[in-house]
Image (cartoon, rainbow, N blue to C red):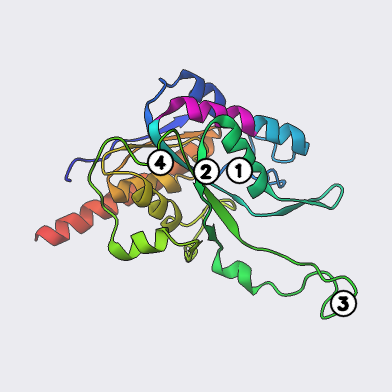
Amino acid sequence: MSKKAMIEIVNADCIQYLKALPPDSIDLVVTSPPYNCGMPYRTYCDSRPWEEYLSWCRDWLSLLYRVCRRGGRIAINVLFEMGLKKNSVRVFPAKEFIDLIQYAGFTVYGVPLWADAHKGRLTAWGSWRSASCPYIYNPCEVVIIACKGERKKLVKGIDTISRDDFIHGCSGIWRIRPDTCSLTLASFPVALPKLAIELLSFHNELVLDPFCGSGTTGIACLQTGRNFIGVEVDPEYCEIARARIAQAQKSLNNNDKGTHE
C-alpha cells in the first residue's frame, strides 16, 4: 500500500468537465454541492430560483451516473432543511436530492445524519420560551449514499478502514467534530469525506469531487491512499486547494520519515 496517490485539481465548470470525462471511469464521488443559500461565491450564483437550482442539480447528477463505474458509489453531502429567504418557505434539500439521485439512475441505500458540534449551541429561535411562535430548527446535514447498479462492488480491493470506523460509518448518525480552522465558510471537516472514502472505496481507487472548493476531499484521499480528481470553477479556490494538499503531503512525508528513523 505504498503507492503514492495521484491528486489532481482542475479549474473548470463541473458540467463541462463531466461531459468530457470517459464513461465508467470513476469509482466514488464524494462532494458537497452549493446549497443555494446565498453564499458569496465569486464565480457562481448561490441564490437561484429553487426550481432552476434543482434543474441544474439534475443535470450534473445525470452526468455523474454516466462517469461512474458499474458498482461505483456516490456520497452527496446536503442540508436536511433550509429556508428560502425571499418568501420564508422552508424546503427540504435532502428529500429533493434523494429524488434527483434516483431519477439519475442511482440506487439510494443510506442517508446518515451528521452535524457540526457548534451548531448545536444555537438556542433562540422564533419566540423565545413561548408557545407563540417557536421555530423548530434542525442543524443536521445528511450524506446521501447511492450506487450505480449492484450494491456489492464487482472487484475486490484493499480495505483501509478500522473496525471502529466501519461500525461508525454503518450507523445512522456520523458523529464528526468540526475542524479547528476552516478556510472557507462552506468547507466540511476532513473527517467527513475520510469516513465516506474508507467506507465506500478501496485503496488506490479513483475518487471525484466535482465541487472541490478548498480541497478537503483531496486531503482525505491523500490520507487514505486514494487517487483524486477535484473540479473547481473558482481559480482562487483551486490555488487554496493545491496549497492545502501540498501541506498535507508534507505532513505525511514528515510522519513517514519519523516512523522510519
Task: Determine whether the residue tagged by mark 3 lies in a helix, strand or loop.
Answer: loop
Q: CA distance from mark 2 to mark 3?
A: 38 Å
Does residue 144 appear in the picture of this structure?
Answer: yes
Give how far apart the Cα atoms at labels 1 and 3 are.
33 Å
Residue linked to disc 1: 98
Q: Quadrant of residue 132?
A: bottom right
Tell me whether circle 2 and circle 1 mark residues in contact (CB < 8 Å): yes
**Three-letter code, disc 4:** Arg
Q: Which residue is mark 3?
A: 131
CA distance separating discs 3 and 4? 46 Å
Q: Is residue 58 left or right of residue 108?
A: right
Instruction: Determine if the magenta segment contains residue 125.
Output: no
75 vs 21, nearest the viewer? 75
Label 1: few (<14), some or many (≥20) within 10 Å?
A: some
Circle 4 SS class: loop
Query: Taking the image as drawn, is residue 213 in sight?
Result: no
Q: Earlier in the sequence, mark 4 or mark 1?
A: 1
Q: Which residue is mark 2?
A: 108
Q: Which residue is mark 4?
A: 151
Specify the amino acid type for callout 2.
Val
Is there CB contact under 8 Å for labels 2 and 3? no
Residue 119 spot, x, y in % from top left: 62, 67
In the rendered image, which quarter contains the C terminus?
bottom left
Give the residues in magenta.
57-69
Task: Give the mark nearer the N terminus: 2 vs 4.
Answer: 2
**Which residue appears at 17% of the width and 46% of the height?**
1
Q: Amino acid at mark 1?
A: Ile
Q: Nearer the viewer, mark 2 or mark 3?
A: 2
- Across and down, in percent, residue 42 comes to 64, 38
Query: How many numbered circles does the render carry?
Result: 4
